[in-house]
Amino acid sequence: MLTATHLWQPFQEFVFMRRALLGGLVLACSTAPLGVFLILRRMSLIGDAVAHGILPGAALGFWMAGLSLPALTLGGLGAGLSMAGLAAWITRRTGLREDASLAAIYPISLAAGVLILGLAGKRLDLLHVLFGSALAVDGPTLTGMLWVCGISLVAMALIYRPLLLDTLDPLFLRTVSRLGPLAHGVFLTLVVLNLVIGFQAIGALMVVGLMMLPAAASRFWSRRLPILMIIAALLGCISVWLGLLLSFNFSLPSGPAIVLVAGASYLLSVVFGPVHGLLRRPPLLTSQ
Amino acid sequence: MISCQALRWGAPGQPLTPPLTMERPTGSLTAIIGANGSGKTSLLKVLAGLQKPLAGKATVNVPKRGGVSFLPQQQYLDRQFPISLQELVAAGAWGSSHTPAMRRLRLKTVLDDWALDGLEHRPLMALSGGELQRALLARLSLADAPLLLLDEPHAALDEQGQALLWRHLHKWHADGKTAVVVCHDLGAVREHIPHTLLVSHSRCVLGRSVDLIAQQPSAWVA
C-alpha cells in the first residue's frame, strides 16, 4: 500500500537517494525550457544526436585523466559543441539539411567514442555512459548539476526575447538586432552543457528523454510559452521523483524508470490534454 | 535612399533578371510587379540586407539597425507558435527608448489602427489569415522605420483590410517614408502607387505605374 511515508521515506533515509532526487529535480528544471525551445525550433532530434556525439570527448577525457568530473565534462562539452558546430557549418556551406548533417555526424562520433573506450581498456562501462545511474550521483557531480542549472536558467532568462524572436521570425529579428546568432549559439551551448552534466547523472540517452518528453507533453496543456515551460519543468520533476521511488521500491535501473514515467506522462497528455488532445474536440477557436 | 548598380540577384549561378540599375529617392513609393518566380521577393530581401546580391551593388541609406522594416509573406511564420497576437505586435517596439507607459500607449494605438482591438490575447493559431496579416502590419507600424519593404501586404486581406492598408500606405508616404511594395493587384497598383518596377527574365523597367500597367495585357489588370 502506498502511503505518504512511502513517498518520502527513502529520501529521508538514504543520502544517495536525496542526492539523486535533488540532482534530478534541478536537471528537470533546467532542461525543460531548453526542450520546449528545441521543439519550437524543429530541432527535436538534435538532443539525441548531441547525446551520442558527446561520447568520444568523454571517452578521451576518461583516457587522459581517468574517471574525473572536470575531464569528462570538458571532453563531452568539446565533442558536443564541435559536432553541433561542424554540422551547422556543413549545412551553411553545402545546403545539406541540418537534421541530415547531424544524422551523418553522430554515428561517426559514437563509433569514435566506442573505439577510444576500447583502446582505453574498457574500464569505463559503455552501458553506464549511455544509460547511467541516478543513484551514483556523488557530491561533486551534484555541485556541478546545481551550477549548470543555475547558469542555464539565468542565461535562458537573458536570451529569452531574442531567442523567442529568432525562433518565430528570424528575418524580422535580423532587421532590428544582431542578437539572433548570439542567442542561437548560447542556446545550443546550454543544450550541450545540460546533456553533458546529465549524462553523468542519468546517462547520455536518458537525459535526452528528460529533456524532450516533458516538453513534448506540455504542448497538450497550454498555448502560452511561459506556461509551457513551467508545465514541462513540473512534469519533469514529477517524473524524477516517481521514477526514483519506483526504482527504489522495485529495484529497477533509475534512469529508465525516470524516463518511462516521463513517457507515461507524455502518452497521458496526448490522450487527455486539453489542447488538441485525442479526447478533446478541437476547440471553437481554430484557425479560419 | 535606394540605389542599385548593375544589381543581379537570385540563386547562385542563376540570376533572375538582367542587371538592374535604379535610384529611388527618399519619400518615394514604388511597386514591384512581375510574374511568379521573376524574383520580386528575392529583390526585396536583397534590399533588406537579408540576402546577398550575385553581382553589382544595392545600397540603402538608412541606419543599420531599425532602419528597414520588412513585411514577409505570412506562410513563412509558424502558426502553431505559442504566443498571443499582442506579443507578436509588441516585438515591433524592439530597441525603442520609450517609457513602459508610452510603449503601452503606442501598442494600443497601433492595435486600434489596424482594427485588432479585442484580439490581443488570441493565440496565433486561432487567427484568420487576414487578422495575422493585419498583426504583421501593426508590428511594422510600431517599428516606425524610415524604409518599408512590403511583400504582398494585401494578401489575405478582405476589402476593409485592403482599404486600411492603402490608407496607411498613403499616410506613410505623406510622412516621408520610403516604401517598396510587391503587389499582384495591378488595378490597385495603378490606383495607389505612383511608380512601378516591372521585373521579368528579359528586362527590368521602372516607370510611372499608369504607363507601365497600360502596356500589360488587359486581362491581368483587375
Image: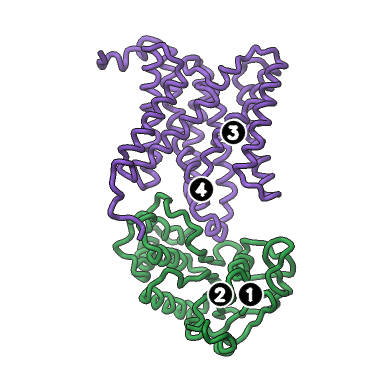
Chain colours: A purple, B green
Query: Who comes first in sequence, dot 3 or dot 4?
Result: 3
Q: Is residue A220 above or below residue A56?
A: below
Q: CA distance from mark 1 to mark 4?
A: 31 Å
Subunit of mark 3?
A
Q: Are marks 1 and 3 in contact (CB under 8 Å)?
A: no
Coordinates of residue B153 in the picture (x, y in percent): 48, 71
Callout 4: chain: A
Residue B33: quarter of image: bottom right
Does residue A74 appear in this view?
Answer: no
CB-based contact (under 8 Å), mark 2 and mark 1: yes
In the rendering, at what x and y percent does residue A69 appear? 59, 20
Compute the Cα span from label 3 to label 4: 20 Å
| Disc 3: CA contacts within 10 A as few (<14), some (14-19) or many (>=20) | many
Residue at point 43% right, 51% down?
Answer: B81
Q: Nearer the viewer, mark 2 or mark 1?
A: 2
The residue wearing badge 3 is A50
Task: Say what secondary structure mark 3 lies in.
Answer: helix
Q: Residue at x 32, y 16 (%)?
A: A8
Q: Amino acid at mark 1?
A: Ile
**Amino acid at pointer 2:** Val
Contact, mark 1 vs mark 4 (Cβ under 8 Å): no
Rendered location of residue A18, percent (x, y): 41, 16
Quadrant hosting residue B205: bottom right
Q: Residue at coordinates 64% horizontally, 23% vertically from top-left? A: A58
Which amino acid, by three-letter code, is at mark 4?
Leu
Circle 2 residue = B180
Q: Which residue is mark 4?
A: A163
